[in-house]
Amino acid sequence: MKCSEIDNYIVDHVLDELSPELQIQVNEHLAVCKGCLAEAERAKAVISDFKNAARFVPAPGTFRKIVKQVQLQKPQRARFFGLPRGLVYSFAAFLFGVVITKSIDRVISGTVQPVRIEVRQEIPRGTPYSDTVEFYAAPAKNLARI
């Protein structure tokens, strides 16, 4: 392996996170190359310093101070006529739908000719024609005598 390729694997080598094949190749290169071995030793020292370092604990009021500085005020939502924006948009969409529906109805009803229905009422004649059958309502007592 070349030194430029080993640079990518030095930290993983120190942390023992390489696959067995890569571990062997890196070890072989470190045995031959003193520059890469020195780089590996420096990485090992830095990592061990971080592992052995004491955990930083801030002062008791520090977290609250940071939160106050970082907190952002919620932006005010836009309002129309004192109403929430979503309600105004919904109402506008409803009115738009009504206008479109009425417009379409006018276009459709303007192109279709209305159907003319003629209703005539004839005055009944006193005597029926010979080809006319008239139906009469008979009381039930007369029908039972048959």
Image: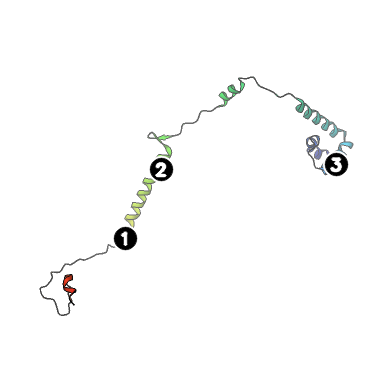
The residue shown at (41%, 40%) is 87
Residue 137 makes an appearance in the image:
no
Question: Within 10 Å of the Cα at label 1, are there few (<14), some (14-19), or many (20+) other Cα atoms?
Answer: few
What is the distance, in whole Å, between disc 2 and disc 1 at their CAs?
32 Å
Residue denoted by label 2: 90
Amino acid of disc 2: Ser
What is the distance, in whole Å, between disc 3 and disc 1 at their CAs?
88 Å
Q: Position of residue 39 (x, y in %)?
A: 82, 32
Query: Foreground residue, 144 or 22?
Result: 144
Amino acid of disc 3: Ile
Tell me whether circle 2 and circle 1 mark residues in contact (CB < 8 Å).
no
Q: Is residue 123 above or below residue 1?
A: below
Among numbered discs 2 and 1, the one appearing first in the sequence: 2
| In-image side of 77 versus 116 (left or right) | right
Choose mark 3 or mark 1, whichever is in front: 3
Q: Secondary structure at mark 3?
A: helix
Quarter of the picture holding the C terminus: bottom left
Residue denoted by label 1: 111
Residue denoted by label 3: 24
Among numbered discs 3 and 1, the one appearing first in the sequence: 3
